[in-house]
Image (cartoon, rainbow, N blue to C red):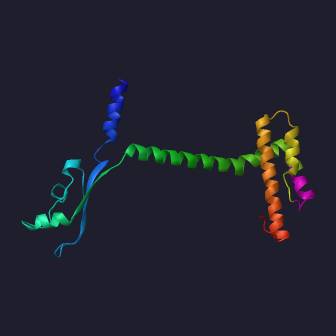
Amino acid sequence: MIKSIIVDNTHVMANSEDVRCKCICPPYRGIEGHIYKQNVSLKDCNCLHVVEPMPVDGKDVEAYCLRCECKYEERSSGTIKFTIIMYLSILGLLLLYMVYLTLLEPMLKRRLFGHSQLIQSDDDVVGDQQPFANAHNVLSRSHSRPNMLNKVEHAQQRWRRQVQEQRKSVFDRHVVLS
């Protein structure tokens, strides 16, 4: 039963849109250049089978066809579909993460620290270069949060301090870090 499903899927995936013969014919005796595409087999991929209607008659057919360049093209629509689905899935995950960072994380921090504590710390230290410095202390003392989350929060706070130090060096001291 599984074998028949696999065979059916490969038959569906290898439909007429996955293989084609493409002939590029340059201008010839007043006839404009043209690109012809047909769904034909590899053995029939030549000017005589692909170029329809033939723009020239009689003995000029052979001369016209010699100028045409025909290529057999094969693609896997299954691979293309899989790639697009993976790309859109990753894009969706990044979008959800962005929504989390912009909407949910501030709400969770307000609940964890208390809304009044955040407002008070913002009012007390207006020019503070490390606005989340006390957040790490509160989180490290919290025993209800898993240890891995504390490590991630610590790394995030360390990164924020480094960014603040770089900003201070560049904007205040006008020194570029090397």
Q: Is residue 114 visible?
A: no
- Residue 86: x and y in percent read 51, 45
Residue extending farthest to the front is: 178
Q: Compare residues 94 and 105 and report the one nearer the observer.
A: 94
Whether residue 120 appears in magenta in the rendering, the answer is yes
Q: Residue at x 27, y 51 (%)?
A: 20
Q: Residue at x 35, y 35 (%)?
A: 9
Q: Compare residues 119 and 6 and report the one nearer the observer.
A: 6
- Residue 32: x and y in percent read 22, 72
Please give the count of numbered marks on the rendered protein: 0
Q: Residue at x 54, y 45 (%)?
A: 89
Residue extending farthest to the left is: 58
Whether residue 92 appears in magenta in the rendering, the answer is no
Quadrant of the frame with the N terminus: top left
Q: For residue 93, which quarter of the picture?
A: top right
Q: Is residue 54 visible?
A: yes
Residue extending farthest to the bottom is: 30
Q: Main secondary structure of the magenta part?
A: helix
Q: For residue 125, which quarter of the picture?
A: bottom right
Left or right? Give the position of 74 relative to 167.
left
Left or right? Give the position of 19 relative to 121.
left
Give the magenta part as a residue range: 118-128
Residue extending farthest to the top is: 1
Q: Residue at x 23, y 48 (%)?
A: 42
Q: Is residue 24 above or below residue 75?
A: below
Q: Is residue 171 above or below residue 116?
A: below
- Residue 140: x and y in percent read 86, 40
Quadrant of the frame with the C terminus: bottom right
- Residue 175: x and y in percent read 81, 69
Left or right? Give the position of 35 relative to 63.
right
Q: Compare residues 4 and 75 and report the one nearer the observer.
A: 75
